[in-house]
Image (tube, rainbow, N blue to C red):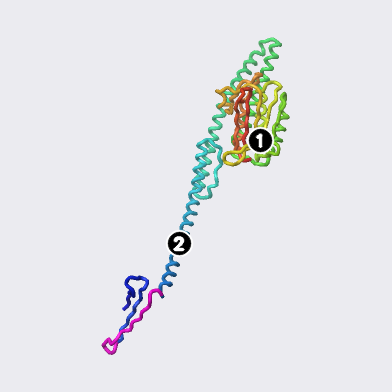
Amino acid sequence: GARSSRMVESDPQTGALYVAAPIRYGDRIVASLTVVKPKDSVTPFIDLARRRSLIAALVTAGAIFLFGGLIFLWVSLPVQRLSQYVSDLRAGKRADLPALGNGEIGRLGQALDDLRKQLEGKNYVERYIQTLNHEIKSPLTALRGSVELLETVSADRRHTLVANIQSQTTRIHNMIERMLDLSTVENQNRVQRVEVNLATLLSEQQQTIQGHSFDNQIGTGESSIVRGDSFLLGRAISNLLRNAADFASPGSTIRCSIRREATPAGSTDLILEVENDGPVIPDYALDRVFDRFYSLPRPRGEKSTGLGLPFVREVMDLHSGTASLVNRSDGRGVIATLRFSDP
């Protein structure tokens, strides 16, 4: 037989293994042979086996955990990206369809993106037709009235009517061109980004503005480089300068500055500001100046399409920046700001 017993009852480490076998002579057991082996001679092998089993269990558990984590990321990341994409669309943000892979999530995302484009296209056309119909009624009414009066008025009066016809025709032409420009920008999801020197672009656009001088303040040694579309940024700056000039006092100086500003997140934004001397924006209009077709009366009576500032806002959205218009603290003019994040 075999058994295990302690050599010292109170000490479990003194156990021994006993194996006994009978010695027979004929049919009788005449003696027995017992082999005794202390347990401490076997303990190292038991400990080694235990350690190997523990290591194998840990490696297996780690492999299962790692594999499970990879599977979780493979499945959950596309879902999280798709969820964020839908949230951005719901919030009215300009968002591109993220990389979702070629699986079911990817196909679902592509289907949602196609549906979004179809709905946006339909709503976009309907909205623009309604807006154009509303905005074009006024100049068309003026044109029709002038044409009807041409044959019944004197030559002197006729000259005034012809000038009015030319003015309204130009207004309609400018409105349609601005709408096409704005439509092009609104339907872009991204731009080809290259390095653009904002200071150089500002100087080029200032040369197209007549009747005003400019005072430029660009920080010494500060980079004015942004990554973006040079043409669109130039048009946006031009619209901002023209808007400042339209509302500025005759012959006044328009002040422009480019500077960097630290953010709470630790990055730096590049800021372009255009400041004029002139009337302030009424409180009721502050939240509407970037709306399509919304414009305030010019001091000199010129008509505006109301599409210049919306174009600026759309261009800044494409470049992940912001555009704002606020009154000066002294109440003597307006400050327009373009802010480029992490240029």
Read off the magenta span: 24-40
The residue mark sitting in front, 2 or 1, is 1
For the point 71% across and 22% down, the residue is 251
Disc 2 crowd rating (10 Å Cα; few below 14, some 14-19, many 20+) is few
- The percent position of residue 117, horizontal first and vertical second, equals 54, 38
For residue 302, say whether it is visible: yes
- Amino acid type at circle 2 is Leu
Taking the view exactly as shown, the residue that stands out farthest to the bottom is 26
Spatial separation of the CA atoms under disc 2 and disc 1:
57 Å
Could you tell me the amino acid type at mark 1? Arg
Query: Does the magenta portion include 165?
Result: no
Pick the residue in front: 296 or 258: 258
Return the residue at label 1: 259
Spot occupied by residue 154 in the image (x, y as percentages of width and height): 69, 10
Is residue 188 something one can see in this rendering? Answer: no
Where's the N terminus, which quadrant?
bottom left
From the viewer's perspective, is residue 288 above or below residue 32? above
Say if 192 sits above or below 257 in the image.
below
35 part of magenta stretch? yes
Name the residue at 44% across, 63% down: 57
Disc 2 designates what residue? 58
Answer with mark 2 or mark 1, whichever residue precedes in sequence: 2
The quarter of the displayed image where residue 221 is located: top right
Q: In this view of the protein, which residue sits in the foreground, 42 or 225?
A: 42
Chief secondary structure of the magenta portion: strand
Rate crowding at label 1 as few (under 14), some (14 to 19) or many (20 or more) other CA atoms within 10 Å.
Answer: some
Percent across and percent down for residue 44 are: 43, 72
Residue 125 found in image quarter: top right
